[in-house]
Image (cartoon, helix red, strand yellow):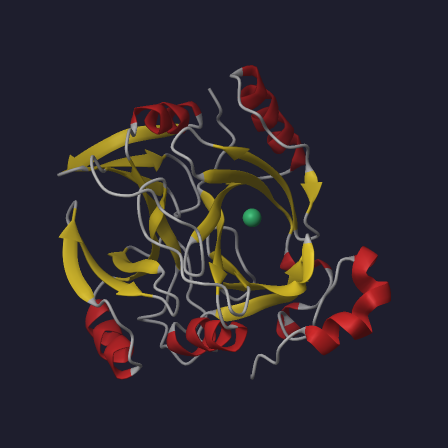
Amino acid sequence: MITDIKGLHHVTSMAGDAAENNRFFTDTLGLRRVKKTVNFDAPEVYHLYYGDEIGTPGSVMTYFPFGDMPRGQRGIGEVGVTEFAVPEGALGYWKDRLAASGVTGLAEDSFLGETRLEFAGPDGDGFALVESADRGRTAWTGGGVPEDAGILGFHGARMRLRDEAATAELLTFMGYTKDETDGDVTRYRIEGGNAADTIDLEAVSGGKAAAQGAGSVHHIAFAVEDRAAQLRVREALVDTGYQVTPVIDRDYFWAIYFRTPGGVLFEIATNEPGFDRDEDTAHLGQALKLPSRYEPYRDRIETHLPPLGA
Ligand code: ZN
């Protein structure tokens, strides 16, 4: 069994309009943009990273805004809800703030004793704010949300699956333990993790498969401390029969990817080196950063990327 996984590292989704995406995450949700770079496989598209002050693993929501990409269709075989943790008592603040910003899909709910507020992102993305203990995490206050309400990082993610048994087995192999069940949803939790430590599996018997597009989660990444831990995880997955990519340098972390039995793409990402490797903490996310192989094309890339606003 794998013992190196610490919880979520980042969640990466696809978006339509880049400026709208940037405004939603920095203004409406009050996260900090911690990196402005491009999709390393498609440099005409941004890769935008939003998180806490330094982009702590477990707090980082990232986007590829493809411009005119059609919306995805929510369904089976995807991450249906990405959950952010907020301090206890903060949901009243958020209900008012999100309603005043015209956010749709607002619905209060409770699940396994937690109060949650579901809402839709700008492309119909499925999100929830969950009241949680801070567990040593601090919200970024530079985005206009007060500290006693601000997003602390991820709480977890909920996957919608037709047959959750194989994914449950995989999560267990990855170090998660089965927690409580509420209706069709079973919670898996990792002990000693980074607080972004739950994965909920929702068993869905009928309905259509998800179709990826704007607003869909592209993949979820799990955190490991360093490259040695990543190699241990890779070896364990390969030995179990998973097809895992080689280690890929993403400049701010190293990544490996594999497709899970339920259809969701998983990544294992290192906590090292972090988002301050090429700009200081005070200026994170402001300048366009390019991987070195694209630096010769900076002028052309900058000309074609849409303006983001602030
Ligand atoms: Zn990723």
Q: Nearer the viewer, residue 73 or 32?
A: 73
Q: Nearer the viewer, residue 271 or 37?
A: 37
Q: Nearer the viewer, residue 273 or 308?
A: 308
Report how many numbered discs are placed on residues in the image: 0
Looking at the image, can residue 2 be seen? yes
Q: Position of residue 204 (x, y in %)?
A: 22, 38
Task: Answer with left or right where residue 303 lies relative to residue 79.
Answer: right
Q: Position of residue 105 (x, y in %)?
A: 23, 67
User: Looking at the picture, does residue 169 appear above or below residue 212?
Assistant: above
Query: Residue at left 38%, top 32%?
Result: 262
Query: Residue at left 34%, top 64%?
Result: 124
Q: Position of residue 45 (x, y in %)?
A: 63, 64
Furthest-right residue in view? 296
Looking at the image, can residue 276 be seen? no
Q: Position of residue 126 (x, y in %)?
A: 32, 58
Task: Answer with left or right where residue 287 lies relative to residue 186.
Answer: right
Residue 184 found in image quarter = top left
Q: Nearer the viewer, residue 273 or 205?
A: 205
Query: Residue at left 76%, top 58%?
Result: 291
User: Looking at the picture, does residue 133 appear above or below residue 263?
Assistant: below
Where is the C terminus found, in terms of image quarters? bottom right
Query: Residue at left 53%, top 66%?
Result: 53
Task: Answer with left or right where residue 221 lies relative to residue 291.
Answer: left
